[in-house]
Image (spheres, rainbow, N blue to C red):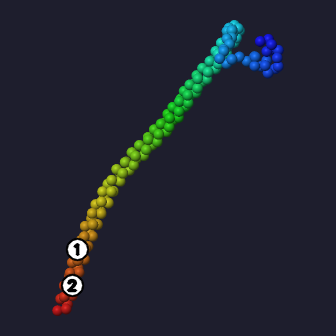
Amino acid sequence: MAAAAEGPPELRASAGKQDPAIETAEEAKEPAEADINELCKDMFSKMATYLTGELTATSEDYKLLENMNKLTSLKYLEMKDIAINISRNLKDLNQKYAALQPYLEQINLIEEQVAALEQAAYKLDAYSKRLEAKYKKLEKR
């Protein structure tokens, strides 16, 4: 094999290559103690950053929910004020209607009387037309 290593470069390259079916083993080396400590510190630092982000996100969600609850509460207070005003106005309207009720009854009574008077006028008109017809009939005789 030493002769192959001393030959032309093409032969040296093929001599350095191994058969793909043959695996080589490497010696397992334990990382240095300082590397493990650094990796642990890095892991804990990144985990702390992650947990801080998660807690911050949760805290922001609760703040958003709190703000939404405050706005909803204010909206309900506005709606309550509107409902109170509507109730007050409805009571005023009912009182005004009650005050107008006697006048409305008088209007209904007058309307009935006008209708009766109109009927009487139609009857009187019909009677006067019959009377006129009789008068003309008598006049012709």
| Residue 45 seen from this side | no
The residue carrying mark 2 is 133
The residue under the point 33% across, 57% down is: 104
Q: Position of residue 43 (x, y in %)?
A: 64, 16
For this rendering, which residue is in front, 131 or 49?
A: 49
| Residue 130 seen from this side | yes
Q: Secondary structure at mark 2?
A: helix
Q: Secondary structure at mark 1?
A: helix
Characterize the local packing of mark 2: few (<14), some (14-19) or many (20 or more) Cα atoms within 10 angstroms: few
State yes or no: discs 1 and 2 in contact (Cβ < 8 Å): no
Q: Quadrant of residue 80?
A: top left
Callout 1, which amino acid? Lys
Q: Position of residue 114 (x, y in %)?
A: 29, 66
The residue under the point 65% across, 17% down is: 21
The residue carrying mark 1 is 123
- The quarter of the rendered structure image containing the N terminus is top right
Q: Is residue 113 left or right of residue 89?
A: left
For this rendering, which residue is in front, 43 or 60?
A: 43
The residue under the point 50% across, 35% down is: 72
Above or below, 68 relative to 16:
below
